[in-house]
Structure formats: structure tokens, C-alpha cells
Amino acid sequence: LEWRRSTFPIKYDEIKEELEKGKYVLRGLDRDGDVIIYIRGCLLGPDTYSSLENHMRQVFYLLERVRAEVLKDPMDKFCIIYDRWDVDRAKSDKPWTKAIAKALGDQYPESMKRCIVYPSNRVFRYIWNLVKVFFDPVTAAKIVMVGSSDELYKFIEKDQLLKTAGGTDDYEFKIEHVETKEMMSLEMRNLERVAPDPQSVY
């Protein structure tokens, strides 16, 4: 694919500064046993990166490592939680929304099982109806609006959720965890696969 040729390789040192911010965290399994990737909305926003292109390179880096090291089979999927706690209007970022939508729809259409947006109130649901035009219909259908913790527990057990998302897992992100399995829960560490060179993703 032309996209892959123009995007990779991605070297760890090139995106380390972005990774250090902990905007994306890999942690826990949903009720189907699929890997959870958190998007921490409170850490996002147009003022949190110098270049959207470089920001997206960390996204591709992490997604490729999930596919290579964590998923047991190429056909396995991941579940995204877009954590909206402490997100205000200043965090609104239409270019980022378009970039994420394009990445998930064009490059990882079969890998994302669902994206849970939590918490989702009436205002955000209205906004979603406006911005979902950026998503292809298949990807848009995988977006699930969740308004309460009880509703979230239908998809993910409490002990598999970070405390910030209403769970009991008190994990705190550290940059060195990107290169180890400490970012993963015990259940995820048991999904052993042969890992590629951690310094670059091809």
C-alpha cells in the first residue's frame, strides 16, 4: 500500500515526546477478551501537539505494535474507549477528529471492533451527529455512546477499567511502559507473541 510505504518505518525516538504525554493507553480486556485502547480526551486538543502529522505517527506506532505484539491472531480486534472525563470545549479538535476517522476507516477497518465514547451526554450526542460525516459508514456504526458506568460495565468488567473510567484499576502511565508489558494487565501479558524490534515499526 502507498500509505504504508509513505508512513513507515516509524522510529521510537521520533515520536517519544508525543508518547510521553500518555494520550493513548493500552490496558485491560473487554468482556469478549479483546484489548482495550484508551484515548484520553482531557489530554488532547490542538494546543497539545506541534504537528498533527507527527501526533498521528504515534497513533500508527502504537496500533502497529498492538497488532504485532498483543493480538493473538491477525483477525483479532481491539476496543477503544474515548474517555471524555474533564473534556471541555477547548479540547475540540476537528482536524484530529478527521485524522482519527480516516486512520481507523482506511487503515484499520477490520481491527477496531468498537469505540466506546464515555461519558456521552445529550450535547455530545448532538455534536456526534454533526461530526460523524467524517467517518465512513462502517466505522461510524462501531461508535457506541455510553452515558453511565452501569452501561459501560455491559461491555467491560469493572476490574478491567481504569479508575478514571469508573473502574478499579489504578494503573498510572509511564513512558517506559511503552517498551515493556507493564502497561498491560496480567491477562494481556499472557497473550505472548514474538515482538519486533521495539525501536522502530515497519
Image (cartoon, rainbow, N blue to C red):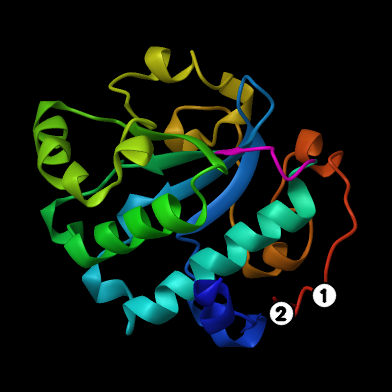
Q: Quadrant of residue 117?
A: top left
**Dot 1, crowdedness within 10 Å: few (<14), some or many (≥20)?**
few
Q: SS of the residue at dot 2?
A: strand
Rendered residue at 57%/73% (across/down): 4
Answer whether residue 171 is visible to the viewer in this image: no
The range drawn in magenta is 73-78
In the image, is residue 73 above or below residue 159? below
Q: In this orientation, which residue lies closer to the viewer: 98 or 42? A: 98
Position in image of residue 71 (x %, y %): 74, 44
Q: From the image, tell me which residue sits under label 1.
A: 197
Q: Is residue 74 magenta?
A: yes
Q: In this orientation, which residue lies closer to the viewer: 126 or 77? A: 77
In the image, is residue 25 above or below residue 8? above
Q: In this orientation, which residue lies closer to the viewer: 139 or 51? A: 139
Position in image of residue 13 (x %, y %): 63, 87
Position in image of residue 113 (x %, y %): 52, 34
Q: SS of the residue at dot 1?
A: loop
Rendered residue at 85%/62% (across/down): 195
Q: In this orientation, which residue lies closer to the viewer: 23 or 129? A: 129
Identify residue type, mark 1. Answer: Asp
Secondary structure of the magenta portion, mostly?
A: loop
Q: Quadrant of residue 91?
A: bottom left
Measured in 3D between alpha carbons, the distance from the residue under mark 1 to the one under mark 2, in whole angstroms, is: 6 Å
Q: From the image, tell me which residue sits under label 2.
A: 200
**Disc 1 vs disc 2: Cβ atoms closer than 8 Å?**
yes
In the image, is residue 189 above or below residue 122? below
**Dot 2, crowdedness within 10 Å: few (<14), some or many (≥20)?**
some
